[in-house]
Amino acid sequence: MTLYLAHFDTIVARNNNDWVELDSLVEVFHANTWLAPGGNRWVPIPLQTPFFYNGVDELAVVFLHSNSTSRYSGDYFSYSSAGNGSLMYKGDASPFPLQQIVSDDFLGSRVTNRPVVRFSMVTSSCQNVSNVHIASVEGNAVRLLWNESGSASQWQVSYAANDGSHSGTLFANDSTVCTIGGLRGNCTYNFSVRPICGEGDTGYYFGNVSAYIETCPVPDSVTADVSIDPLLSDQAIVSWRENGSATQWEVAFSEVTVADSGTAHSGVVSTSTNPFTLTGLYRNTRYNIRVRAVCGADDSSLWSQPVQIYTNRGSFSHDIVQFGEVGSYIDYRAPINGYFNHTWTQNYG
């Protein structure tokens, strides 16, 4: 869900295509999940970016929800304080066509005011911080810097994962530098800062800068080579470049094309060696090969981009291979398409 705010000196939504201009919207909140309502059925939405309102203009609130299926009655609606000033659009498109919707020729449903939005206004003498930026990302820690615009000597730092799985706040004293540790890997976090000027006197959260936490980097430069030796035609030598400190990896293989009545041959093999000899492949078969690093019990990298191989058919020096003891019986197996899949036995008396 994404929340936008805007204010205007004229009434908006006067007709069915009087959409709010896209470049006038301020994104103040974003999360990849819906927030749960509280006990009084209101859904509290903490603004990630401060929004300044003069208390006079028309105020527009825009909610955007994009999903493969509608979860509520409408995936999108905008709300204005003007009479008959609400425009609504419903749809299941993903990603949601916001740029298309705000065009002049796109008609929405014009409805009366809906008293479903309320605000907690904050008046503060605290000046907002500026120049919030990421100084560095090391493992699962982010070093955040900002500039103090007033006289505050304490600040509150907010952080939240984009998928809603992890969030929190912490305090920084006497220094406009803060290190936030314990973040989850393979996840994007948003960070913002607000000043604390005294008891009950705080500024707005400002910044909303983001960083991707990659505690277990993805291996790259993956190669997979099949042997030209017919006796090794069910094998491939897989190698890669480790970009972190992992000493354990997983190698995944999956058959690219499968007969209508067949089942794809696939699997995942763990290894502590690089290069790694992947065995047990089908001959004369096309495979995709991927690698990922395993950095801990619950910490693995994303899978690498696939590389494709084609195992060779294999060949044999004789069309008939003999097994058994001479004088008693001979068991014949004929290779078909690289496999011993036809057998018969001849007995000698």
Image: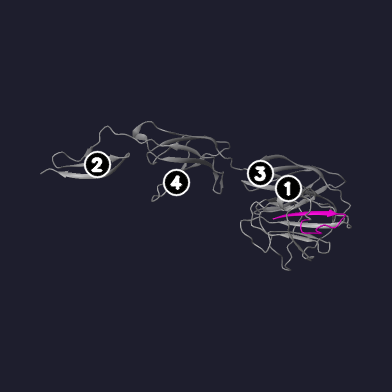
Is residue 312 shown in magenta? no
Q: CA distance from mark 3 to mark 4?
A: 29 Å
Amino acid type of the residue that numbered disc 3 sits on in the rendered structure: Tyr
Left or right, 213 with reference to 203: left
Q: CA distance from mark 1 to mark 2?
A: 68 Å
In percent of the image, x 73 and y 54: which residue is there? 106
Question: Which one is earlier in the sequence, the residue at label 1 or at label 2?
Answer: 1
Magenta-colored span: 1-17
**Residue type highlighted by circle 4:** Gly
Question: Circle 3 sits on which residue?
Answer: 212
Q: Secondary structure at mark 2?
A: strand
Residue 71 lies in quadrant: bottom right
Q: Is residue 66 above or below residue 214?
A: below
Crowding at mark 1 (Cα within 10 Å: few <14, some 14-19, many 20+): many
Residue 241 visible? The answer is no
- Inspect the magenta stretch and tell me whether residue 13 lies in it: yes
Picture disc at residue 267: 4
SS type, badge 1: strand
Badge 1 is on which residue?
191
Disc 1 to disc 4, how far (Cα)?
39 Å
Q: On the picture, is 31 further left or further right than 243?
A: right
Residue 210 in the image: state x and y as whole percent: 71, 45
To which residue does mark 2 refer?
333
| Comparing labels 1 and 2, the label whose residue is closer to the camera | 2
The quadrant where residue 87 appears: bottom right
Q: Quadrant of the C terminus?
A: top left
